[in-house]
Amino acid sequence: MTKPVALRAAMTRAMSQERTRSRTREQLRGWSPRKAKDVSSSTDSRRSATSRSSSKESKEDEIIHYDWAAGQVLNARYRLESLSGDGTFGRVCLATDLVDRREVAIKIIRDVRRYQENAKVEAKILAEVAREDHRGKYHCCLMFDTFTHDSRFFCLVFEPLGSSLYDVIKKNHFRGLWLSDVQRVAKQSLKALKFLHGRLQLTHTDLKAENILFVERGAGIVSYFPREDFWEASTGNNARGHPYYRPTRADIKLIDFGNATFANEHHSSIINTRQYRGPEVVMELGWDHKSDIWSIGCILMELYTGELLFGTHDNLEHLALMEKILRARLPQDMLLRTTSEVRRNYLRWKNPHHGGELELNWPGGASCSSESHVAMQKKLPELVRRRRVDEQLMDFVQKLLEFRPSNRPSAEGALSHDFLSLKIDDSDERI
C-alpha cells in the first residue's frame, strides 16, 4: 500500500475513533518521571498488580498495600477512619488527629525501598514549603507530620483535600470547566508558582491535571455545562443526559512534590509527564522554572476542552503536534542546539547541500497513523469559541506556550494578563 493510500485509510480509521477518545486518555496518562530513574521514553506505570515475574523490580511492583482497618491508631495519634484511595506508591487514608482534634489525610507508602526513598525526598521538600507557608496561603498542599509505622511504612500526614482536576473532568465525561473556574484555577496555580519559583527557587516539574486538587471535598453541585453545543461539535462526543457536577468553589492546591527540583540541584534530562512537557525538555536542551509555565498552559486548555492538548507518546509526533496546534515552527536556534542523537531521530536538513536550516523530519520520519493523528488535530484558534473571554484565554495560553522558555512570562508576569482580571458573568459562559 502506498503512503498516500495508507494515510487516507489511517485518517478514515481516526475519524471513526473520534467518539472513543476518552478511553484513549486513560492509556495516555499515568506515567511521570522519578528521580530514582531517569528515563527517555514514556511508559505507562499502571502495570498489572498480579505479575509473578521473578525479577526484583517485578516483585516490587506487585502492589501490596498496608492492611489498614478502621479504628487503628498510628503513631499513638492518628485514628484511621476510611480509605480515600490507592496509588502505585501507597494508599491514602482519612484519619482523626487525636491530639489536634482535626481530620487529616495520611499517605502510607508501600514497603518498597525506592518508593520510601522518593517519599522521604518529597517530605523534605514539603517541610521547606510548610516552613515558608505554614498557613497554606500560596496554594500548595500542607504537610503536618511524618512518621514510620511498624518500622516498615513511611507515612506523610496532610490536610485533607478534594478531587483532582482530572477526576472532575473525567466524572463529567470529559467536558471542561466553566470559564470562571478555569480563570480561578489559573490564578491560584500561578500564585503557587510565583511562591515556589521566587521564594524557594523550586521547580515543581510534574504539573498536570492529576496533581492539582480542589480544596472542597464534596461532590460539587449539579449544574450544566455552558459550552455543551460547542463541545459536542468540536469533539464529536455527546454527554447529554449525564449530569454535570460543578465544583462548589474552584479553590485549588498543588500536590506531589516528589520530583520538585531546587535551582541549585542536578537537573535530570527528562521531567514532566509526557503530555505536559515543553519543547526544551523533549529536545533535551535543558530546562528551568519556565517548564512549569508550559505545563500550566497545557492544563488550562485541558480544563477548557476536557481533552489533552498534546495527546501523544512519541517525541517526533509531540513536536509535530506543537507546530500544528500553535501554528509556528520550532525556532532555528533551539534546533541547532540539539544533540546529534536528537537530530538523527527527529530532525533533517531542509537543504543539506546549500547550508540550509534544520526542521522536523516530518512527515518523512513518521508512521501513517502518527501522520494522520497530527493531521486530524485542530489548531489552537479552532479549539475555542469566537467569544471575547474565550479568545482572551487563548491569547493567555499562547503566551504560556511560547517555544523559547525565555519568551514565556514568569509566574508573576503571567498574573498580570488581561484574562485573569476579566469579570466573567453568566452571559460570557453561555453560547
Image (cartoon, rainbow, N blue to C red):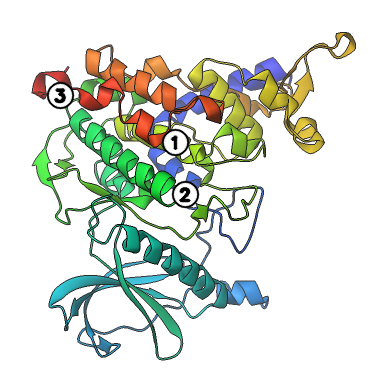
Numbered label tally: 3
> Distance of mark 1 from mark 3, alpha carbons?
23 Å
| Callout 1: SS | helix
* Amino acid at dot 2: Gln
Camera-side residue: 357 or 13? 357
Query: Looking at the rendering, which quadrant does residue 83 occupy?
Result: bottom left
Query: Looking at the rendering, which quadrant does residue 406 occupy?
Result: top right
For disc 3, the marked residue is 424
In this rendering, would 323 be left or right of 136? right
> Distance of mark 2 from mark 1, alpha carbons?
14 Å
For disc 2, the marked residue is 201
Name above or below for residue 136 compared with residue 389.
below
Across and down, in percent, residue 12 comes to 53, 22
| Callout 3: SS | loop
Q: Residue furthest top?
A: 354
Name above or below for residue 393 compared with residue 128.
above
The reply to whether residue 62 is in sight is no
* Residue for point 14% across, 73% down: 102
For disc 1, the marked residue is 293
Q: Residues within 10 Å of mark 3 (few under 14, many from 20)?
A: some
In this rendering, would 117 be left or right of 360? left
Camera-side residue: 286 or 53? 286
* Amino acid at dot 1: Ile
* Residue for point 54% across, 35% down: 278
* Residue for point 60% across, 39% down: 281
Q: Residues within 10 Å of mark 2 (few under 14, many from 20)?
A: some
